[in-house]
């Protein structure tokens, strides 16, 4: 009966992962249990195990789902521009799905699908003169940067941050006040930070040649 119910609602691994991410976004990651997800999908809990064999596999799949939203034409761009686009696209995907941020921060999630995506990115970077070891370090560094920035944005909303900064005494702390006044918007700041990291890798590559 469970399998029939699954077929009747068109259950697939992708639809399960989509529902899990939606549930995490709306109710928090702690709400994503196999039983709760099954109820959300109106199927028996055991049905899910035909598609995701464990909760760990479900979590890896949720990370995979967000990674697949990052659409960067690595082959069509210089490697530095492709990496910049990757970091910005990942930040956008995490902003749309904050329930998965903590998973991306703690799980490598090397599923068959994410391995294919990563292999293609490393191949493109290598074609641009970036060795695989350096290419992987670049992707991992920018991933960590995007995850950290997304987590900060989610846990510390900009409005609260702005209110705290406005309270700085300009007379007592003139340099801090000047820096706050002229600072970039969060999106621009992240983009500049990404460019700085990429420039550092470019300088390292040039030095090693």
Image: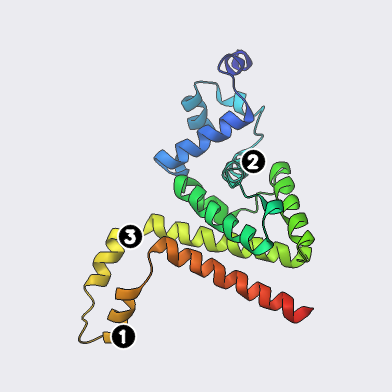
Residue indicated by mark 3: 158
Q: For the point 38% across and 69% down, which residue is it?
A: 184
Residue 43 at x, y percent in the picture:
53, 21
Residue 22 at x, y percent in the picture:
47, 36
Residue 182 at x, y percent in the picture:
33, 75
Mark number, residue 175: 1
Q: Nearer the viewer, residue 35 or 13?
A: 13
Please indicate whether residue 203 sits to the left or right of residue 131 in the image.
Answer: left
At mark 2, the secondary structure is helix
At mark 1, the secondary structure is helix
Q: For the point 57% across and 29% down, which residue is it?
A: 15
* Circle 1 Cα neighbour tier, 10 Å, few/some/many (<14 / 14–19 / ≥20): few
The quarter of the picture where the N terminus appears is top right
Camera-near label (2 vs 1) is 1
Residue indicated by mark 2: 57
Residue 108 at x, y percent in the picture:
65, 54
* Circle 3 Cα neighbour tier, 10 Å, few/some/many (<14 / 14–19 / ≥20): some
């Amino acid at each position: 009966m469970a399998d029939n119910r699954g077929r009747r609602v068109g259950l697939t691994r992708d639809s399960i992962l989509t529902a899990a991410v939606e549930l995490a976004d709306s109710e928090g990651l702690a709400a994503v249990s196999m039983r709760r997800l099954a109820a959300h999908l109106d199927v028996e809990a055991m049905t899910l195990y035909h598609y995701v064999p464990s909760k760990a596999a479900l979590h890896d799949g949720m990370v995979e789902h967000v990674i697949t939203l990052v659409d960067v034409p690595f082959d069509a761009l210089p490697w530095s521009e492709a990496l910049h686009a990757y970091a910005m696209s990942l930040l956008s995907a995490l902003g749309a799905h904050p329930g998965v941020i903590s998973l991306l921060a703690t799980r490598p999630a090397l599923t068959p699908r994410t391995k294919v995506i990563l292999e293609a990115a490393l191949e493109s970077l290598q074609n641009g003169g970036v060795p695989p070891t350096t290419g992987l370090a670049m992707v991992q560094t920018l991933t960590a940067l995007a995850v950290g920035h997304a987590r900060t944005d989610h846990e510390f909303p900009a409005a609260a941050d702005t209110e705290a900064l406005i309270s700085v005494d300009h007379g007592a702390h003139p340099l801090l006040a000047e820096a706050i006044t002229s600072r970039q918007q969060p999106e621009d700041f992240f983009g500049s930070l990404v460019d700085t990291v990429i420039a550092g890798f470019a300088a390292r590559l040039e030095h090693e040649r």
